[in-house]
Image: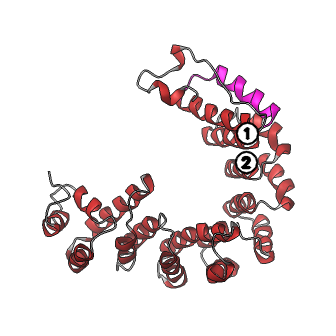
Amino acid sequence: MRDIDTPIETLIDDLRDVAQPMPTALVYRLSDPLEEDLSIFEANWEGIPVERRRQFVARLADIGEESYEFNFEKVASFASEDLDAEVREHAVKALWTSDTLSTMWRLIDLLRSDPAEEVRARAATGLGPYILRTELEELSEEITSEATDLLVDTFANEMENQDLRRHCLEAVSSAMRDDVLELISEAADSPDVKMRASAVYAMGRNSHEQWSSDILKALGSTEPEMRFQACQAAGEMLLVDAVPQLITLAQSSDIEIRQAAIWALGEIGGDQATDFLQRLADDEDDPDLLEEIEEALQMASLSVGELAMFVFSEDDLDADSPDDDLLPH
C-alpha cells in the first residue's frame, strides 16, 4: 500500500498501469500540491491511458464534493484542458468546490468555447454560485457581469442545445435582473416539461414574489418532475400558502417528492407544518426517512419558538445505525 510520502513518480506509474488499483495516495498528494509535484504530474499526464485519466479526475470530483478539506483547483483546472471531453467534464465538476475568481474565469471560457455540450453545461452550473454570491453582496456585479451576461445570452440563443439552455437558466436564476425574470417566464411557457421544471427551479432560486402562484400551480401538476421542483421552490420561498399541498405530497408514494415536501415543510415552518411533521414522525418506520423528518421538524419548530423533541422506541431504530444519528440533539 502506497502512502502520501511515496515518490510522485512511483504514484504516477501506478496510475498509468491499468492493472494497479487507483492510487489514492496520489489523489491526496495533489490536493493543494507543491509546484514541483504539479509540474511532474502535468508532464506525465498525456502518457496516462484515457480511461485512467477519466477515473482519476472523477475521483477528484467525488472526494472534493465529500470534503471541503481538499483543494483540487490546480489539477482540475489543468485537466479541464484535456483532449478527452469526459475528462474535461469530470474536471469541471471538480472545480465546483472552488470559489476563486480564476475558477470563475475558467468556467466562463469553457461555457463560451468548449466543443462538448456536456462540458459547457457543467461549466454553466459551476457559475451559479458566483451569481448567488453577487446577490448576497459577497461579489460585485462588475466582477460577475460577464458570467451573468453569458448565461443569459446562451439561454436566449434558441440554436443552443436544450439541456445546456436549462443549465444556464438554473445557474443565472438568482440574479434579480429584469432580463432574468423574462427568461424564467419564457421557460415556464415552454412545451418541454424539462424546461418548465427548470423554470420552477429557477423561480425558487430567484424568490421573487411574482412566482408564488406559478409554484402553487406546479405543486398540482400531473408531471412528477414539476411537483418535485415545486416542492423545492416552495421551501426556498417559504411559501406558507403551499403548506396544505405540501402535506398531501409529503404522503406521496414517490419517495423523492415525499422527501422534497418534508424538507419544504421544515423550511416554511409554522404550527400546521410542525403538527403534521410530528404526526408523520410518530407513524414512520423507516430510520432514514425518520431522520429527515426529524431534521425538518427541528427546522420548522424554530418558527414557533420551540425545538421539537420526540421519544423513539427501540423498534424505531435501525440496529446498524448509531443512536446519536437518529435521536434529537
Q: In this view, does 26 lie to the left or right of 186?
A: left
Instruction: Check disc 2 and give the amino acid type.
Output: Gly
Counting residues from the start of the chain, the first of labels 1 and 2 encountered is 2
Q: Is residue 75 left or right of residue 247?
A: left
Q: In this view, does 20 lie to the left or right of 158?
A: left
Q: Residue 265 carries which label?
A: 1
- Where is residue 208 drawn, in percent x and y? 81, 62
Quadrant containing the C terminus in the rendered view: top right
Which residue occupies the foreground of this view, 213 or 278? 278
Which residue occupies the foreground of this view, 266 or 164? 266
- Where is residue 235 drawn, in percent x and y? 73, 48
- Where is residue 296 drawn, in percent x and y? 66, 36
Which residue occupies the foreground of this view, 186 or 46? 46
Q: Do the residues labelled 1 and 2 touch (CB within 8 Å)?
A: yes
Residue for badge 2: 235
Q: Does the magenta stretch include residue 271?
A: yes
Q: Give the range drawn in magenta.
A: 270-287
Q: Does the magenta stretch include residue 20?
A: no
Q: Residue at x 38, y 80 (%)?
A: 81
* Vertical comparison of 328 with 198: above or below: above
Q: Callout 2 environment at 10 Å: few (<14), some (14 to 19), or many (20+)? A: many
- Where is residue 102 drawn, in percent x and y? 48, 79
Instruction: Check disc 1 and give the amino acid type.
Output: Leu
Q: Which residue is drawn at 77% across and 53% down?
A: 237
SS label for mark 2: helix
* Residue 166 seen in the current view: no
